[in-house]
Image (tube, coloured by chain):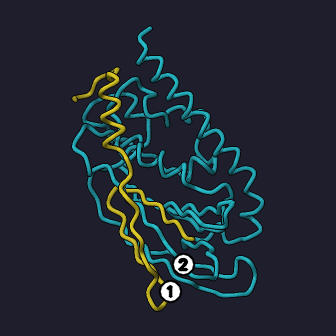
Amino acid sequence: MGSPDYPTIEQVAELKRKSEVVAPELVPLNSQQQLSVTIPPNGVALLEVA
Amino acid sequence: MPANRLRLKACVRAAMLFFFALFVLQLHCSEQVSHHGSVGHRRRACTLPNRGLRIRFYSAHHQRHDWPRRNDVFLDIRQRIRGVGNPEELPELGIWSAGSARRSAAVFYTFTLLHKLGDTQIESGEGPVLATKRKDGSLAILVWNLIPRPPGQKSSTGDPITQNAVQNEPEGEALNLNLARIRGGSSSWPSAYYAGR
């Protein structure tokens, strides 16, 4: 794709498709009611607690 | 004007409106945050409900894809939402604000995850944690791990936009957060959890 100043509709669609957030992972708390999370460099994560 | 350019402008406007709304929401929620206290301490803490917990963990980072990335646009979201940063810089948060597709995939993720946050901010300490409560009572906690670049270091592209914006190193150490209960109680928000390295 390179670095187009004005991407085409197809390129925008490709970016959006590849940028879809991965499926969430269900993580149980341990017996001490703790949860460990590892965030990679320049990473972002969302914890949903229900 | 090309149709795709109009769409890009629409995206920029939408992003600006979204972050402005978040900024206003932060102002609205500041009183509640102060009520919970401990905003200023260095530990990362947030309150969680005292009931069975079902945690869904979304994770993403820009290295998942190999297209050109601009780490400078992966901003410290919490700082922006809290209005610590210069509000005039908010337009730079737009994915397409520079008229270029050379933006980090992390920005796409971040926008998506921001939309999953609740509308009320709850207690959280200093650090890369933004804890929110949704109307249905569930919690949405955003965490991130930025690797900031030393101030004054120019980018390899020489792009003045890059040089004037927040920049992050492409490499760095992973951040290990540990979320744990630190106190209990019987109110609707009885438990506090500590999240730290």
Q: Determine the residue positioned at 32% across, 65% down.
A: B174
Taking the image as shown, residue B126 lies to the left or right of residue A27, namely: right
Taking the image as shown, residue B10 lies to the left or right of residue B108, namely: right
Residue that extends furthest to the top in the rendered view of this protein: B1
Q: Determine the residue positioned at 54% across, 78% down.
A: B53
Image location (x, y in percent) of residue B107: 41, 43
Q: Which residue is mark 1?
A: A33
Q: Label 1: chain?
A: A
Q: Colour of chain A?
A: yellow
Q: Which residue is mark 2?
A: B53
Residue type highlighted by circle 2:
Leu
Residue B128 visible to an observer of this rendering: yes
Q: Colour of chain B?
A: cyan
Residue type highlighted by circle 1:
Gln
Residue B124 location, quadrant: bottom right
Image location (x, y in percent) of residue B69: 29, 40
